[in-house]
Image (cartoon, rainbow, N blue to C red):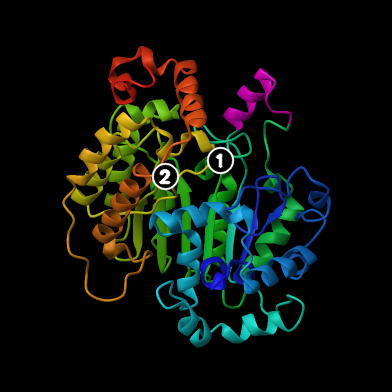
Amino acid sequence: MTVSKYFCNIPWFEVHINADGTYHTCGAQPNKISGTEEAKVYNVFNMPISEWINSQHQRITRLKKLMGFNEPLCFMCYEEDSLGSSSKRVKENLKSGISPVNFKKTFQQSPDYKLFDYSAHHDGETKIKPVSYHISLGNECNLACRMCSPTASSKIAVEEIRLGNYYGPARQNWTEDSVVWKQVTDYICATPDLKFVHIIGGEPLLNPRFEELVDLLILAGKTDIYLGFTTNGTVFNQELILKLNQFRHVDIGISIECVGPLNDYIRRGSTTETVLNNINQYLEYRQEGHVYVTVRPVPSALSVHTLDELYRWCIDRRLDVMTNFLVRPEFMQIKHLPQDVKNRLLIQYKHWHFEQPIPGESDPRDPNRYREHIDNEIRAIIKALEEPANPKLTKELYEKIALWRWLEHDEIAKYFESITEA
């Protein structure tokens, strides 16, 4: 049944706003609205959230989900599903009680089934206000990660403009328009059943609007929510942590790829020691029991060599892990490493000690199941290593590594040594 493979509840419950102010169905999709004719209409400057909800774009998107349409923009989730990693699609469906194990039964018994059925019979329209907001506060960032893009890092944008590879603006930040910022935050704070707010960047902790939004939510009495943000871990704000302690559930997602020197090569501008120290500070000052720290790596052909060391570091601190397997740029996918490198890594990962999962139904959002989540990610890595490579993409991967001059540094060159790519 194709609906079970492709259905996703995000178009009903979530609003995503990009760094440039354009709307977006889901943050896990590549941004295909910005820079198009649609962008002139579907943006916070020309269309309020109330109109975006039942715009033609969103109505068509909902109908596609209900019909089990294989949406090319959703390939990240499909790839993670195929590897056995917990995709955003699966995690969000679980909020509606929809399980991938028994989709048909749980879909029909979902407390949200009537909402989906209403849309099916009303041309994709919905009669509810979204309860989840996924918002980029701008692309300002102090890092230039190898797998990132100009729309998510001003530092990369400046580099790519200089090289003639990118023709967009170096900085994107819709929140600088005070009128629009007030309209958006007023709408969010007035949402009767607000449940989730997740903030991304760039690096959101560099943007003063982040703490302002936290203050606005507190002032509006919206602390009984799940508040999350993703940071690169280079910034620590103790005063902000004390404010976050007021919310029912906070997830501080920290992006880091490894615990050794390889991380600094991947996440350019970062100092791994600083990030690890900041994670420890978050753990010290957070209110344990409802403020959680989650490590958020992006497993790739660049990081897989020492990623298991990061997972062991997390286990020692009882830290949960939530990944998004890299799917673009495609040449950086784990499966495109040379076969002899993958063989070495398979031996390494198959020596992992798996533990028995906690009894009861698995929940990828339950931080108490951190060990189960990490074990599942190890299994997904093994599966990715067992997939066949595309020789052209393997060649592209090693051309990039050579261009970055990684092979000139013994501390990381050893990970990429290959007979076939010598």
418 or 92, nearer to the observer? 418
Amino acid under disc 1:
Gly
Amino acid under disc 2:
Asn
x%, y% of residue 127?
70, 81
Picture quadrant of residue 81: bottom left
Residue furthest to the top: 408
Q: Quadrant of the C terminus?
A: top left
x%, y% of residue 291?
35, 60
State the residue position of label 2. 237
Q: Are marks 2 and 1 in contact (CB under 8 Å)?
A: no
Upstream in sequence: badge 2 or badge 1: 1
x%, y% of residue 240?
44, 51
Q: Is residue 75 above or below residue 160?
A: below
x%, y% of residue 357?
22, 66
Q: Label 2: state its secondary structure.
A: loop
Identify which residue is drawn at 29% across, 52% down: 379
Q: Is residue 251 visible?
A: yes
| Residue range corresponding to the magenta coloring | 154-167
Q: Is label 2 or label 1 in front? A: 1
Q: Is residue 153 above or below residue 9?
A: above
289 or 7, nearer to the observer? 7
State the residue position of label 1. 202
Identify which residue is drawn at 29% across, 15% down: 410
Is residue 375 on the magenta stretch?
no
Q: Is residue 235 visible?
A: no
